[in-house]
Image (spheres, rainbow, N blue to C red):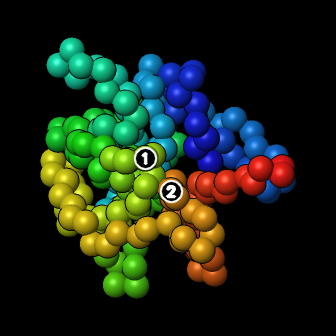
């Protein structure tokens, strides 16, 4: 598990002990970085780390929603990551911030969920089809957009993950209280 540790300026990895109740710090993957929503993915004999980094770009302060960075390594876990030469691989608040794990479909096509943060943090979730993922090139295109479920009073989706039997979503809801509460 890679929990949020941007306050420490690290990307930290934890290993499950008695799953899901206990977690033990394993290692720091990257230091001196203000990053969130970090995801690790194995593809073509490389480990890929996607993360949203807050910082300065051309003297302008950027938020966690503005840019997506990619790193790769030969082994995992490791603290030796190589930055992708196209970094940031995605720029702009509409498609940069990760919204869950990178996944493959039945035909081995690769997808990256991303939050559209234009109107609100996670207002929609874009499902990006990764067209090219190499040490020198990254290309993707939006394949689908998922909106929050209105019947649940959901207004934002921050995470969308899949397993064999489950789909897990982290949604933000707005339920207005009546005057009698």
Residue shown at 35%/78% (left/top)? 108
In the rendering, at what x and y percent does residue 57 appear?
Answer: 22, 22
- Is 151 placed left or right of 31 in the picture? right
Query: Which picture quadrant has residue 162?
Result: bottom right
- Residue 138 disc label: none
Q: Nearer the viewer, residue 140 or 172?
A: 172
Instruction: Describe the element under mark 2 as helix, strand or loop.
Output: strand
Which residue is denoted by mark 1 in the rendering? 120
Disc 1 and disc 2: Cα gap in Å?
Answer: 7 Å
From the viewer's perspective, is residue 86 above or below residue 39? above
Instruction: Describe the element under mark 1 as helix, strand or loop.
Output: loop
Q: For the residue carrying disc 1, how many other residues have a C-alpha within 10 Å: few (<14), some (14-19), or many (20+)?
A: some
Residue shown at 34%/84% (left/top)? 107
Q: Nearer the viewer, residue 49 or 124?
A: 124
Q: Nearer the viewer, residue 162 or 71?
A: 162
Q: For the residue carrying disc 2, how many other residues have a C-alpha within 10 Å: few (<14), some (14-19), or many (20+)?
A: many
Residue 107 appears in the figure: yes
- Is 122 placed left or right of 21 in the picture? left
Residue shown at 41%/60% (left/top)? 124
In the rendering, at what x and y percent does residue 36 appear?
Answer: 48, 37
Residue shown at 30%/64% (left/top)? 128
Which residue is denoted by mark 2 in the rendering? 156
Q: Nearer the viewer, residue 72 or 35?
A: 35
């Amino acid at each position: 598990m890679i929990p949020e540790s941007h306050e420490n300026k690290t990307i930290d990895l934890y290993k499950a002990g008695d799953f899901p109740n206990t977690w033990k710090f394993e290692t720091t993957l990257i230091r001196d970085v203000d990053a969130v929503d970090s995801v690790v993915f194995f593809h073509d004999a490389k480990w890929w780390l996607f993360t949203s980094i807050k910082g300065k770009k051309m003297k302008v302060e950027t938020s966690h929603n503005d840019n997506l960075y990619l790193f790769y390594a030969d082994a995992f876990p490791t603290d030796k990551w190589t930055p992708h030469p196209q970094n940031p691989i995605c720029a702009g608040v509409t498609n940069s911030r990760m919204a869950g794990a990178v996944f493959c479909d039945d035909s081995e096509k690769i997808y990256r969920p991303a939050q559209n943060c234009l109107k609100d943090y996670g207002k929609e979730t874009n499902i990006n089809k990764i067209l090219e993922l190499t040490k020198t090139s990254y290309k993707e295109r939006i394949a689908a957009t998922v909106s929050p479920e209105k019947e649940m009073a959901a207004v934002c989706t921050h995470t969308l993950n899949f397993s064999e039997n489950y789909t897990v979503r982290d949604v933000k809801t707005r339920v207005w209280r009546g005057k009698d509460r």
